């Protein structure tokens, strides 16, 4: 049963807020007003009156939440950004404590109702790859972006990336793991901020991915458009995009499922990995100490060709060549120069020894050669997850930072996985 409910009250709640400077501030929360749609579940059904053993209630849709903040003995508005930061934290915490799939259980008849409690059903692996064309929030220089990711906005369940200074096209290449309780209704939220040092960070944009759109056991490579507000979709301003790799695997999934980040990989290849290794996993197992998986191997990259490159000189031509680099090790290779051609063909193969394939990436940049050096034309950034999973593939990639152009690459992986305890 779903009912719209309203609650108004005036409790006096005092919060002890710790700032970055270590200063404690007592903040009062009062004048709370709330309206939302609640889901009531009467379960289990029994033969004795009132015919159900317990009631579960959960917030399915929030319509309005208002409250007043006040620093005890002072004015909260005198501290820039503090009110907004506390307001957002309180809202997230209150909503998450009762928002579906979280549910509160009220026993009506004596009995064991542990099966009604919220339980983990799977793990979401997220690789935060990069962002591009972010809005600049700084008057001098460029934004210092970092990302916050969560399924449930609780402090101990929220992940934060490192800050990339002075860059509107940051590369993070960071891996995070989240517990999933209900893949059919939950979603991953990504918020990108501009770090302002001791002041409150400024939101650049946010995005969401519904977990129901992910195919279990298959890596999803996704670019998400950043918006100002997830609830208000009428936002046409360009705020940039964020690039994610997503992999959802339910507990108990068997046969043919590959989780490249799992701690119990097969020693042969990732194609044969994780044959039901998560079966029977209980809630307590989610937080147990995991082993770090180090996947070593040789990455062979064939730079086949490019097409429709943008002109780089007054004659409408270019002298393109390609530079390939592994981000973690810095190992580089480059192709020969093809003169006067916007559709060059190279067909050159380069081998890279990779020490940590799941956490490294390949950066492929195209340059125009001239007498006095080189001019940047565009780039492709590739994680190694796909080639590790598929062993070999060929694809055409659009050039980032260029008005036009695509790069045709062939990638092959020869694995040599080893393990070490983290």
Image: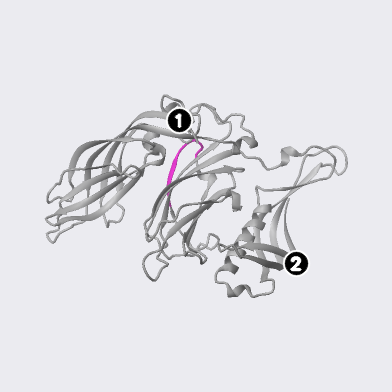
Disc 2, SS: loop
Observer able to see residue 76: yes
Q: Is residue 217 magenta?
A: yes
- Neighbor class of circle 2 (other Cα within 10 Å; few <14, some 14-19, many 20+) is few
- According to the picture, the residue beneath numbered tag 1 turns out to be 419
Q: Position of residue 167 (x, y in %)?
A: 37, 59
- Residue at (19%, 47%) from the top-left corner? 321
Q: Is residue 186 magenta?
A: no
User: Which image quadrant is residue 330 in?
Assistant: top left
Q: Is residue 84 left or right of residue 97?
A: left
Above-or-below relation of 405 to 215: below
- Residue at (53%, 59%) from the top-left corner? 230
In the image, 330 versus 364, the foreground residue is 330
Q: Nearer the viewer, mark 1 or mark 2?
A: 1
Alpha-carbon span between mark 1 and mark 2: 53 Å
Magenta residue span: 215-223
- Residue at (42%, 62%) from the top-left corner? 239
- Neighbor class of circle 1 (other Cα within 10 Å; few <14, some 14-19, many 20+) is some
Q: Position of residue 18 (x, y in %)?
A: 62, 62
Above-or-below relation of 105 to 200: above
Q: Position of residue 234 (x, y in %)?
A: 49, 65
- According to the picture, the residue beneath numbered tag 2 turns out to be 12
Q: Is mark 1 in CB contact (under 8 Å) with mark 2?
A: no
Q: Is residue 139 left or right of residue 286?
A: left
- Looking at marks 1 and 2 on the same chain, the residue that comes earlier in the sequence is marked by 2
In the image, 160 versus 275, the foreground residue is 160
User: Which image quadrant is residue 283 in?
Assistant: top right
């Amino acid at each position: 049963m779903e009912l719209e409910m309203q609650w108004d009250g005036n409790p006096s709640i005092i919060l002890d807020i710790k700032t970055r400077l270590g200063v404690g501030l007592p903040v009062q929360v009062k004048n709370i007003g709330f309206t939302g749609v609640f889901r009531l579940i009467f379960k289990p059904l029994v033969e004795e009156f009132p015919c159900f053993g317990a009631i579960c209630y959960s917030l399915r849709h929030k319509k309005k939440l208002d409250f007043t903040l006040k620093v005890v003995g002072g004015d909260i508005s005198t501290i820039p950004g503090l009110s907004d930061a506390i307001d957002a934290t309180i809202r997230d915490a209150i909503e998450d404590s009762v928002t579906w799939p979280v549910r509160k259980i009220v026993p009506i008849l004596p009995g064991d109702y542990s099966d009604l409690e919220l339980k983990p059903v799977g793990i979401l692996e997220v690789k935060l790859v990069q962002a591009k064309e972010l809005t600049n929030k700084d008057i001098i220089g460029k934004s210092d972006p970092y990302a916050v990711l969560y399924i449930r906005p609780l402090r101990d369940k929220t992940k934060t990336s490192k800050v990339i200074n002075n860059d509107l096209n940051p590369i993070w290449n960071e891996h995070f793991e989240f517990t999933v309780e209900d893949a059919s209704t939950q979603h991953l939220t990504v918020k990108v901020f501009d770090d302002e040092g001791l002041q409150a960070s400024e939101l650049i944009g946010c995005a969401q991915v519904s977990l129901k759109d992910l195919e279990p056991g298959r890596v999803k490579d996704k670019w998400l458009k950043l918006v100002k507000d997830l609830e208000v979709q009428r936002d046409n301003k360009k705020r940039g995009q964020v690039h994610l790799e997503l992999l959802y695997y339910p507990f108990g999934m068997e046969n043919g499922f590959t989780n490249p980040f799992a701690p119990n990989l097969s020693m042969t290849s990732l194609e044969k990995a994780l044959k039901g290794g998560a079966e029977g996993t209980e809630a307590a197992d989610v937080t147990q100490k995991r082993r770090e998986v180090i996947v070593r191997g040789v990455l062979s990259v064939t730079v086949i060709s490019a097409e429709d490159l943008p002109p780089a000189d007054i004659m409408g031509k270019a002298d393109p060549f390609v530079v390939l680099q592994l981000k973690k090790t810095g190992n580089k290779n480059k192709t020969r120069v093809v003169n006067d051609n916007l559709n060059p063909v190279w067909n050159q193969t380069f081998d890279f020894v990779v020490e940590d394939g799941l956490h490294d990436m390949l950066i492929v940049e195209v340059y125009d050669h001239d007498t006095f050096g080189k001019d940047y034309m565009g780039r492709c950034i590739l994680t190694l997850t796909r080639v590790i999973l598929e062993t070999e593939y060929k694809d055409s990639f659009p050039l980032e930072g260029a008005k036009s152009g695509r790069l045709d690459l062939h990638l092959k992986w020869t694995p040599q996985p080893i393990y070490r305890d983290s």
